[in-house]
Amino acid sequence: MHKLQRYIAHFDLDSFFVSVEVLNNPDLKDKPVIVGGSRERGVVAACSYAARKFGVHSAMPMKQALLLCPQAILVRGTRGEYSKFSRWVTEIIAAKAPLFEKASIDEFYLDLTGMDKYFDVFNWTIELRKEIIDKTQLPISFGLATNKMIAKIATDEAKPNGYIFVQPGMEKDFLAPLPVTKIPGVGESTFTVLKEMGVRLIGDILLKTPEEMDKRLGKWGTDLWQKAHGLHFSEVSPYHEAKSISTENTFEENTANTEFLLSELVRMTERVAFELRQDEMLAGCIAVKIRYPNFETTTRQTTIHYTLRDDELIPAAIALFHKLYRKGKPVRLLGVRLSELTNNAVQGSLFDEAEKKTNLYKAIDDVKIKYGRSFLQKARTVKKDKRD
């Protein structure tokens, strides 16, 4: 029986968080923009290509990024906006692709195997990219290849805002001239060993035997040998909703002030509950995370009745905090995560009380959307006047 030729596309929204911020504020276009936390203690969540020219990259400490690029414009970012645009792109892809996997908020794999019987797969993929750009105004790149790994590497090579098709049979030719660090999973320690073996480009691995690779790197060496030959067998997993919503805050100064910590906890729980309602989901589990100055991190979670309401989530978060927190010990970071998400509104306690409370939350959320999230807050999250 004739085996079907695999076609896998990898789509990646370019500098996604920055692109969304530029759409909302066109004055940021072509400027060195960094999306992330505070100047002192935050990390870079995303950065524009103009900022990358100075050596800035995601996950870099904000202090270091601003030393490299002092003129950078720092934007805090809003998860709700990113979710909105991500869902929009997801809906466009879902309407067209026979099978797709949402790998992250801004990254998708599409399995187009078998479609070549009916039309040109490359042209179809170009048209889908054009539709995404036309509708959302977001830049997006794609790689089309015979497997997920090569498609992803092709996307990285196509950026910014471009596309590459690695045709069947051309995998090794495409990979050979690229740095070996382009293979996902090759970090600094692996690269150090590979350099000792005289391997700097992916093509250098083609001159080695699987036994040589295994001797130096074990099973990972054999995997690398296969990948250098363009072999990768991971399947595209059907799309599922994100499994959690979370937020965390690294404080400007470590603090052991319990009143302040509880106030922050309430504020963050309100925030994730608001996101939950915007996503039209219920949560069945809540977790609290505490990190101390020595980077020791502890997390505790509890299952709850499926809910979207602050007055059920906040007491659960506070109870977890009291069980977790070592009294008197300064805290560096505090986080809240909601998981076991479902969009099945029949479950849990959504309708077990009068509809009144659900309508109240809807009214509160409408005010927050109109005037900003800080417009309405729980009393505990509002700083008291020092004269009181």
Image (cartoon, rainbow, N blue to C red):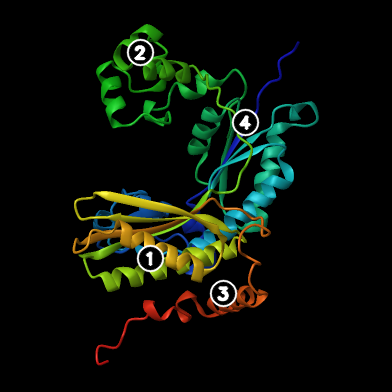
Q: Earlier in the sequence, mark 2 or mark 3?
A: 2
The residue pinned by badge 4 equals 8
Dot 4: within a 10 Å radius of its alpha carbon, few (fewer than 14), some, or many (20 or more) residues? Answer: many
Dot 1: within a 10 Å radius of its alpha carbon, few (fewer than 14), some, or many (20 or more) residues? Answer: some
The residue pinned by badge 3 equals 365
The reply, left or right, for residue 267 in relation to residue 358 is left
| Quarter containing the C terminus | bottom left
- The residues tagged by marks 1 and 2 sit, at their Cα atoms, a distance apart of 52 Å
Q: Which of marks 1 and 3 is nearer the N terminus?
A: 1
Q: Earlier in the sequence, mark 2 or mark 4?
A: 4
- The residues tagged by marks 2 and 4 sit, at their Cα atoms, a distance apart of 28 Å
Q: Which amino acid does label 2 sit on?
A: Met
Name the residue rendered at 48%, 38% in the picture.
156
Q: Which amino acid does label 4 sit on?
A: Ile
- The residues tagged by marks 1 and 3 sit, at their Cα atoms, a distance apart of 22 Å
Dot 3: within a 10 Å radius of its alpha carbon, few (fewer than 14), some, or many (20 or more) residues? Answer: some
Tag 4, which secondary structure? Answer: strand
Q: Which of marks 1 and 4 is nearer the N terminus?
A: 4
The reply, left or right, for residue 138 in relation to residue 193 is right
The residue pinned by badge 1 equals 318
